[in-house]
Amino acid sequence: MTPTPRTAVVTGASSGIGRATALSLAATGYHVIAGARRLPLLEDLARTPGIHCAQLDVTDQDSVDRFVAEIDRCDVLVNNAGGAIGADSIAEANLADWQAMYDVNVLGTLRLTKALLPLLIESGDGQVVTIGSIAARESYRGGGGYNVAKHGVAALTRVLRIEMLGLPVRVSEIDPGLVETEFSINRFGGDAEAAARVYAGLTPLSAADIADAVTWVVQRPPHVNIDSMLILARDQVSAQVVHRRA
């Protein structure tokens, strides 16, 4: 009898790290449930064998409830939905932007984790992988609201790890540095030139690099928990210290 494939839920799957992770996990045999706000961008992904797509807005509890209601098994949850808005100083902070970053990064992660935790425990070998950021480890000029949000995600993830001790659920946080995706375009309100300057003259990580790490982490034996992982490009040594070639 063919064993039932393990099920992985991936949030923020319409592009970037989320999309790459959904494809990578499906390629290794997982049944993937991919969720994202922008349903039209999931159409190509939905044609991939092993991937089921559904609309999901992690900032909306009703959306989360509808999404989770269709799930009857969850072995892996990849909390990827998140993002940064702007790079204002504290003195010029936009409170609405700070609220939005907290809602999507911290409360979004909390909503999905809380909703799927019973299924993760029931699986007998569940795993939560949260995509954090170097911003969770290192504060930097202009990081403001994003630093606060990602530090909150890191705290949430660590508390979950502590609270899952003795239960069959592993908890991991993967913190990337510079990854060339839509992240910077979204951060700078669609300003492609500003986004391009972030990566100019260096070789950043790709979404596939982080997806490879997620796939490796979830494939460790059940007794092995990769608590945290910081992934940087060779050209980056800290949040704002990079090597740029002329």
Image (cartoon, grey):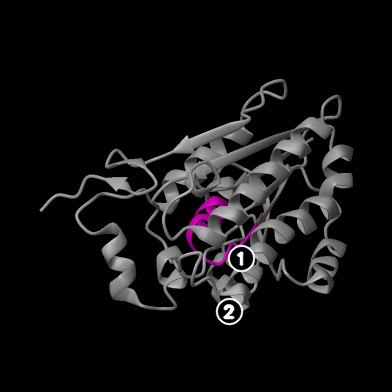
Q: Is residue 201 left or right of residue 170?
A: left
Structural distance between the alpha carbons of marks 2 and 1: 23 Å
Residue receiving disc 1: 101
Task: Say which amino acid is labelled 1.
Answer: Met
Say which residue appears at 64% left-offset and 73% top-offset.
Answer: 37
Camera-side residue: 142 or 62?
Answer: 142
Q: Where is residue 35 shown, x and y percent of the image?
A: 67, 64
Residue 47 drawn at (x, y percent):
58, 67
Residue 194 colored in magenta in the image: no
In percent of the image, x 28 and y 66: which residue is there? 196
Q: What is the span of residues highlighted in magenta in the rendered image?
A: 11-23
Could you tell me which secondary element the residue under label 1 belongs to? helix
Q: Residue 5, how many percent across, how many down?
A: 72, 42
Relative height, residue 123 to residue 57 (above, below): above
Main SS class of the magenta portion in the image: helix
Whether residue 140 is visible here, answered yes or no, is yes
31 or 38, which lies in front? 38
Mark 1 Cα shell of 10 Å, populated few (<14), some (14-19), many (≥20): many
**In this rendering, is residue 167 above or below 23?**
above
Q: Hey, which residue is sitting farthest top in the picture?
A: 223
Kindly identify the amino acid type of the residue bearing the numbered disc 2: Pro
Q: Residue 74 in the image: x percent, y percent? A: 79, 47
Say which of 158 and 36 sits in front.
Answer: 158
Task: Say whether residue 15 is magenta.
Answer: yes
**Residue 2 in view of the camera:** no
Tell me the mark number nearer the camera, choosing from 2 and 1: 1
Q: Secondary structure at mark 2?
A: helix
Q: Which residue is mark 2?
A: 40
